[in-house]
Amino acid sequence: VNQVPDIYRILPEVILTLTGVAVMFIDASLPPGLPRRPLGWVAAVGTTVALWASLWQLSLPQGTGFFSTVETSAFTIFFHVLICGIVLVALLLSLDTLPEGSHHQGEFYALVVFGAVGMCLLTGAVELLVVFIALEISSISTYILAGYRKNTGRGPEAAIKYFLLGSFATAFLLYGIALIFGATGTTQIYEVAHLAPTAQNHSFVLAGLALMLVGILFKVSAAPFHIWTPDVYEGAPAPVVALLSTAPKAAAFALLLRVVYEMFPSLHAIWSPLLWIVAVLSMTVGNLAALRQENAKRMLAYSSIAHAGYLLAAFAGLGTSGIAAASFYIAAYAAMNVGIFAVITLVSGYDERLPMIDDFRGLIYRSPLLGGLLIFFLASLVGIPFTGGFFGKFYSFSAAVDGGAIALAIIGLLNSGLAAAYYLRVALVAAQRSPGKSAEETAAAPRVGVAVGAALFFAVAATLILGIAPGEVLRAAEAGAHTLQAPSAQATNPGLSVAQQPNP
Amino acid sequence: VNAINNSILTWIMLVPLAGAVLVTLVPDRAKLPNWIALLTALVSFGLTLHLPAHFVLGQSGFQFVINIPWIENPAIFYHVGVDGLSLWLVVLTGLLAPIGVIASWNAITERRKVFFVLFLIQQTAMFGVFISLDLMLYYAFWELSLVPMAILIAMYGRKDGPRAALKFFLFTFIPSAPLLVAILWLYAKTGSFDFITLQILIAHGNFPAGAIYLVALAFLVAFAVKVPVFPLHGWLADTFSEAPVAMAMVVAGKLGLYSMLRFHIGLFPAQAQAVAPWMIALAVIGILYSACLALVQRDFWRLLAFAAISHLSLITLGIYGFTFTGSAGAVYQILNHGVVDGALFLLLGFLYDRYATSQIADYGGVAAKLPRAAALFVIASLAMIGLPMLNNFVGEFLILSSTFTGVSRGWAIAASLGVILGAAYMLWLIQRIFYGPESELTRSTPARDLQFKELAVLMPLAVLMLLMGLIPSLWLRSIETGFHPSSPQARTVDTHFVAQGGQR
């Protein structure tokens, strides 16, 4: 019945894998003295091709391949494009900032690309074991990348923390999968969705769901599973954090959407209040902790926890509107977060000479371009209109209001008022004149290379487009939301998508 | 002309933005940014003059309307238009732009590009607030108007800019969170952000009474902070004493008051009437309390800030008196306040440029050195006090007389005390700064009297004070159109007024 060759269903993953292997082989066969920087361009080109391949998949009919283990649909393509885009920007960012020589550059690019394979596969998998494998592929790469600054104490510390807690969380996920298999006799997501409501051992299903949620919420760094985030972000190199704080989270959120909306729509009454609590906890804990940070990366780590909370608010929405809002938020969050980490990478440098918020003092005078971009991305994180952050919050909270969670929306918006305080603090520091030591700082004014320039341009363009003309992306997210719901054939709901009425 | 009428509002809004882009592109040399900003401001002021020239008197409803879809889902429309209420506010905003640019001509010496870019973006945001008829569009501009102001306070603050900027931002950003939730709630219930549609739907009252009351309250609080109404005025004094003259001059008061009239009373007449007694009480307390505080200030920026709160509270009194005369008088008084307060700001700014202190006690006998400045200051102060033949007299008289006949004699008498206190603190200020024995500072600092540029910005304002005092009908005729019984805006005002047995 399925006429599409299976290989087309995972074409982006195949291309990424080939790119990664090629990068590793070339790296190994080059004499040690040669610069490894061109390998970064190879990886970037490969990622671009994978991005086009994902877009090309739109021409495929929706369906599954490899014995119903991977799916291509508007939903998977949305996340493939998003993840490939993030990885591309992160690669461009690393190209100009990774120090030559001592660091294993070739491996670095290969690991980034292999990580992308896992993340892409994670969004397309509809079989829990493939989900697990994909998660491992992406996690192992990111564990190594997190510890890439081997010569400092913080690098290995970050990697070990991330690895130990991460594998612990993956064990939870795996245990959850096992329980679900025990209750339903299958690990195929559609079949689980079909069998779960009538499963003999209902408590196994519930326990399985809970354990899987723990595993996934760890990956998206939602409170109370967020403890690792600040340490890892502080220890990992900034270009890696740009990737780490966005792409794996996008993949994990895609998985979360799939688990709750596609696999367990029947347990809505169970997971909805759970996610409500996690959302409120994440925003509040994240924002309160961020207020007190002095290190820019730690502050952004807590801010990313808060953003996970805003995003989870969308899960209070019903069906399509909730999924579309969450997908859109991930895209907006990724654009602005990659952007701000790009700026931080340039200012602090790979070796982090200037990691503290105070080191950004007078940035706008040292480098008007970087200062302006920093303020722009901060404005987007605050949620100022005409930036992606605004519509992200807007869709997320309107999904919540639609779903009847008005209290959640109000808590969320009050939280974004609180968040404005610490974002603004950085913006104000950047706009403040620094007393003395100007010569030293002028010397430290960072140069913006071609690759980084392109990375910044993509991030700014994406943030602006999402803020001024979000229609196209939202339509794609909605199309994805519909395909995600299709197999379980839920009743359509009067959410965002129907709310549009003729304007007199 | 028809073609111009159909696009004029877009042009008014876009011209400052285009100017801002242009300023970023030119080199900061030979006052080039200043000239571009001035040219842009003059062009946009010229364009705003088109509105009163082609405004059809006696025609109810909105004119120069543009209504095209902006974002499909949620249904956000680019719906703009002006009526008698907003017409002159747009013109006032246009007028203050070139004046603000010239006032900053010599005062802003560093980073002129940043200053003028943000100043022009602020203009766009303010035009946007006054002409938006779609709640989401309105909210977007409302939020946007905070950002340039906050950054400029931080960058150009006189003593502790960043702290004042943070205070300003949080005070005005946090209450807009409930405002957004309220707007989203309305959208979830009605599927529309359109002002006119919502007005009709709310008038037909198919909403739960308790919920709509809270929604109206969320609108009110957001606006009351911006005005500011006692006891939410904590940010204003700091903002006035830190902000660059041009910025403080353009933002003071009018955004919040306009929003109250349009979106609180306009959308929720019944709910607004329910809180009107409270608002009247708060307004009168605000008038007296801040007038008393103004009497004891030692810093002239703070004195001006409390004077402004006192006058803005009087306008609030006019708005919530729910009388036809009071409402028209309130709008007229917003214009007067913009002109008079603008002139006082400019004059104090010129003094500050010369003597670099805002402590009143340091001054004395300045009139002998700067006779022109003294004369203009006296004129502006007399206008502020409400001397007949000058503009404030008309507005204050309309508000106080309508309060006396239509609301309550007690409140009217109490509010009139504020006018007397106003005379006291302004005349005392004049006496302390301009007359009396020459102080150490005035003797030792060489200072020239007002120069051509300074006179060029002050003279038009002085002429306006006289004109608006002598022939108020020029303005009041079109303002009253906004409250014409047949216009939806004023239907509510009128029915209430008739119900009370009052007469026009």
Image (spheres, rainbow, N blue to C red):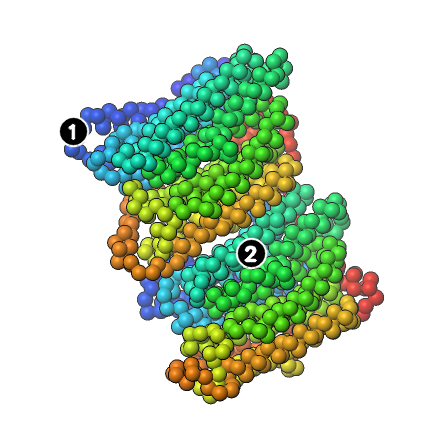
| Residue B98, placed above or below residue A455 | below
In this view of the protein, which residue sits in the foreground, B41 or A502? Answer: B41
Whole-angstrom CA distance, mark 2 to mark 1, is 61 Å
Q: Quadrant of residue B449?
A: bottom left
B358 relative to A106 in the view: left or right? right
Which residue occupies 46% across, 86% down? B438
Dot 1 falls on which chain?
Answer: A
Q: In which quarter of the image is residue A396?
A: top right
Name the quarter where the C terminus of chain B is drawn. Answer: bottom right
B457 relative to B476 in the view: left or right? left
Q: Point out the frontmost of discs 2 and 1.
A: 2
Circle number at residue A31: 1
Cβ–Cβ under 8 Å for marks 2 and 1: no
Label 1 SS: loop
Disc 2 residue type (three-letter): Phe
Label 2 SS: helix
Name the quarter where the N terminus of chain B is drawn. Answer: bottom right
Residue B63, position in %: x, y? 63, 61
Circle number at residue A295: none
Q: How many labels does the image show?
A: 2
Dot 2 falls on which chain?
Answer: B
| Residue A161, placed above or below residue B101 | above
Q: Is residue B303 visible?
A: yes
| Residue B456, placed above or below residue A407 | below
Which residue occupies 57% across, 45% down? A413
Residue B89, position in %: x, y? 59, 66
Which residue occupies 41% across, 85% down? B443
| Residue designated by label 2 | B171
